[in-house]
Image: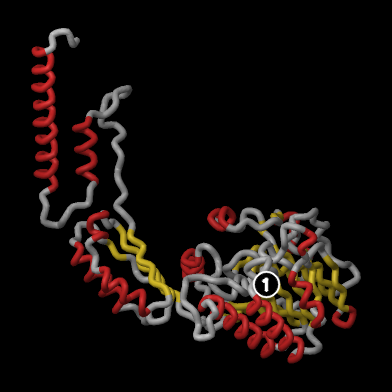
Amino acid sequence: MRLVHLSDLHLGFRQYQRLTPGGINQREADVAGAFRLAIDRTIALKPNLVVVGGDVFHAVRPPNPAILQAFSQFSRLRRELPDAHVVIVAGNHDVPRASETGCILRLFSQLGIEVADAEPRRIRVPELDLSVLAVPDTGAVRPALTPDPSARYNVLLLHGEVAGMLPQALVDSDRARAEITPEALGAEQWSYVALGHYHVYRAVAPNAWYAGSIEYTSANPWGELIEQQGAGIPGKGLIEHDLATGTHRFHPIAPVRPMLDLPVVSARGLTAADVDARIRETVDGAATPIDGAIVRLVVRDVPRHIARELDHAALREYKRRALHFHLDTRRPELRRAHAAAVPGRRPSLAEVVREHLVARVLEHDLDREALIALGVDYLRAADAIDRTASDTIAVAEPGIA
């Protein structure tokens, strides 16, 4: 008794300005390609049940090519696996704000797919001795999450946030309507809990999992990439789970397009030419060529004047080769003066300047102590000129106190 769990398809997702020869946004085409691969893998696995954990589309009103792609691939799934049961719940990206708008997911019910979009549904499959409680992310009052005692196998399919399990950055940037505590989830009651909303493959209990998205479609794809690498997850994919034996397997989907987060470059103390050379070495030394890829290169400790002097012709060439090349230059962090002055007294201008020059990133051939001494001397000279000017004004105009 096997199921396939996939989620967060985000069909219709668009990014960057590159188009296919047919005029489709290239990232939209990439996501459609990943969905085709996911359906290919699902058909090859021949499960008894397929559950989709929401966010089928990236927007409530998806573009026509995305609708056609979804209908075509779900039709193929039903045609190739006529005995498999397919259940979809709506995610926060699928559910319209106004109830009279209607949810596009109802279209798939014409294919014999069970859809829960406006309210939770309990779907019984007697021939499999199976019951599926499908809970969409509508923000409405959630029913008690209790299994069907008459069924041997009980699956909970839910799109939402399990409280305390998701990174704060995700919670703040893309909030699901439904939030549930681990206690209310009650994973131990279920044969399997299939979750949608979080874009990285992750367990919240031994039998409760986020399948993750099938492509990098969140507001923070680099965070996803870093989390996957740290956890040893080989990218995006789908879950195969056997309800009878508990056997669980994650099936990676071959990436349609490389996502490259290149090694961080430090520009501390370097000239613009030195930084150009470091960037070139990093790009040329990448294990995967940047051609056609989505690329980020972080360069730390880059003063504004150095960033302006970089070889922008070379950067334009990198951008031409890649689908998207993001040079993320980050200015040096400044250390602020805290205890330089007596408590209750604001630091003097000389003290502020000294602290600034201590923290500033300098060219490699500059003497920091000599620079600090020169800066303080300039301040003293300016102060002396100011005092002389004040004395002259006081003599000329004795009425001024």
Q: Residues within 10 Å of mark 1 (few under 14, many from 20)?
A: many
Residue under the image location 30 percent in, 39 percent down: 336
Q: Is any atom of residue 200 visible in this view?
A: yes
Residue 12 position (above or below residue 97): below
Horizontal and vertical percent for residue 292? 42, 81
Viewport quadrant of the N terminus = bottom right
Q: Is residue 102 left or right of residue 348?
A: right
Horizontal and vertical percent for residue 206? 67, 67
Residue 325 position (above or below residue 287): above
Q: Is residue 381 left or right of residue 29?
A: left
Residue under the image location 62 percent in, 68 percent down: 58
Q: Quadrant of residue 95?
A: bottom right
Horizontal and vertical percent for residue 268? 23, 57
Viewport quadrant of the C terminus = top left
Residue under the image location 81 percent in, 62 percent down: 119
Horizontal and vertical percent for residue 160? 68, 60
Residue type at the position of mark 1: Val
Q: Is any atom of residue 206 visible in this view?
A: no
Name the element at disc 1: loop
The residue closer to the viewer here, 376 or 343, is: 376
Residue 73 position (above or below residue 182): below
The residue closer to the viewer here, 142 or 130, is: 142
Q: Quadrant of residue 133?
A: bottom right
Task: Give the residue pinned by disc 1.
Answer: 56
Residue 379 position (above or below residue 237): above
